[in-house]
Image (tube, grey):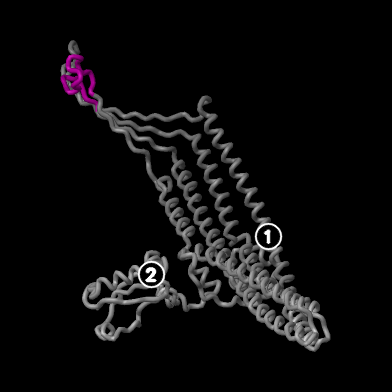
Amino acid sequence: MRQLTVITNGSETRSGHGRGFLIRDASWITYTLLMALALGPTVRISAHEMTDDSSHGGSLEGVSRAGAPGGGNSSLAEKDSISGIHADSTRWSEQTWDPKSLVQLAWKRNSGMRAQRLQVKGLHSNSSHTWYLDAPQVGVNFYQAPVATFPNPMGRQSEVDYSVQQAFPFPGKISARIDAVHQHAEMGEADLLALRRKVARMVRDDFYALDLTRQRQAINDENRALMVRFIAVARRQYEVGLGRQADILRAQAELTRLQSDSIDLAEARASTLADMNALLDFTTTREWNLATPPDPKPIDWTLEQLRPLIEKDQPGLKSMRVGVAMREAELRAAGKEYLPDIMVEGMYKDMLRMPPGSMATKLEDFWSLGVSVNVPFAFWSAPKYQAAIAEGRANLESAEQAYADSRNGMLAAAQTALQKSRTGAARLRLNVEALVPQSEQALVSMLAAYEGGKEEFTPLLEAYRARWEARENMATARANALSTLADLEDAVGMDLDEIARWLAPGAGK
């Protein structure tokens, strides 16, 4: 059985049931549609399969409500299906996502990575990446046809010549050309690995930014509740003659400022969420149940320990190494252009008749075979190939210098990340163990003193702002510490767990 459901702005009405889309009251459904358009722009009409019992009982079970978790996302479910990821929307909404699981999802869905994979496929499918010879040339020559038969070449010609010729590159040219194109394709694959690392970093940055916004919003919520309490206390103090009306107004102004900050935080969250959803190829407003990031791991590695891993596995450096190999292959191919190509030609002469006055008494067919070569090292053609070799050498030296510069940059980035990870961990520990608890105690003490009439409102407000700043600094220090670890992962080209496995005693030996 089917039921027609009209959903508008999170509410729904139903009409008609039976086989197909039988509507018992056409005027009622028309009225419903008009009301739907009047109530809001989001209107969705869907038909839900129902059992016989549900059609009589009017149960709403199984009907997806717009705005409910997992509901109102039919277009998203269709998009998931098109992308090859068949997942229940409700399950995805209920699942808790950590950075690693989001990165794995991004690697599957990111449009940029899909485009790069197709580009790599195209590079491997390049015609120059396969062994082939240039197409042969086949010719027919109608020889010594009388002028009177023009334009018909088949009229009384003396002979018909059939020829075929094929060019053969000098041995080694084809393999040099294939090698250069193959290195280009390998560079595309290395670029894909670099893009994979870049996408992972962007997802992690958005994840940490969303978590920082969540922490700052929680601090804002607590501060607003605290400021409401301050306003109530200031009113009581004013009523008993221990306070001033200005204290109430200052507290109200602070509350208004917190409300404004909350709006800014919501805007920042929406922007970051849109960026992350774009990376994951989802609608920009999709919500995620994000896990709390793990505490930053202490790092005690040295640059000398990480150097072999950076030089071996860093995706950007790997791409540039392949680029150097590609330039070397291009230089070898340019050098082989100095070698001549060989042209082989075969011809068959079909003798039909001899010209008048010929002394020949018998017609005989003939065949001939010819071999020719081009001469690229002739003084008028050599400059072309000499320039190609000079260009190849310059490109190779440029690629080598770019690789050296990038390697130095990666080593410097790794050293900076190692240093920042240590200072960041110390700064976070100082906030957690000292600054935040001390500011909390100072605020509690100052609030008690103000309520007892022993302190003015200004010191209380300063203590509140010191606590606010300490908690904000702690949240920022945590986010910065996590971001620094992501910097280290980028510089090495591995996740922290992978680095730890490689550096474990006996690993790789």
Residue at label 2? 74
231 vs 200: above or below: below
275 vs 347: above or below: below
Q: Which x, y percent locates residue 182?
A: 47, 50
Disc 1 crowd, CA 10 A, few/some/many (<14, 14-19, 20+): some
- Whether residue 80 is visible here, answered yes or no, is no
First-in-chain label (1 vs 2): 2
Q: Which numbered circle lies on residue 238?
A: none
Q: Which numbered circle lies on residue 411?
A: 1
Q: Quadrant of residue 166?
A: top left
- Residue at 64% from the left image edge and 54% from the top image edge: 406
Nearer to the camera, 360 or 188: 188
Q: Which x, y percent locates residue 262?
A: 62, 71
- Residue at 81% from the left image edge and 81% from the top image edge: 456
- Residue at 24% from the left image edge and 26% from the top image edge: 161
Label 2 amino acid?
Ser
* Range of residues picked out in magenta: 142-161
In magenta segment, residue 370: no
Q: Which x, y percent locates residue 491?
A: 63, 62
Label 1 amino acid?
Leu
Nearer to the camera, 108 or 64: 64
- Residue at 75% from the left image edge and 85% from the top image edge: 239
Nearer to the camera, 140 or 227: 227
Q: In which quarter of the image is residue 141?
A: top left
Nearer to the camera, 210 or 407: 210
Q: Which x, y percent locates residue 231?
A: 71, 81
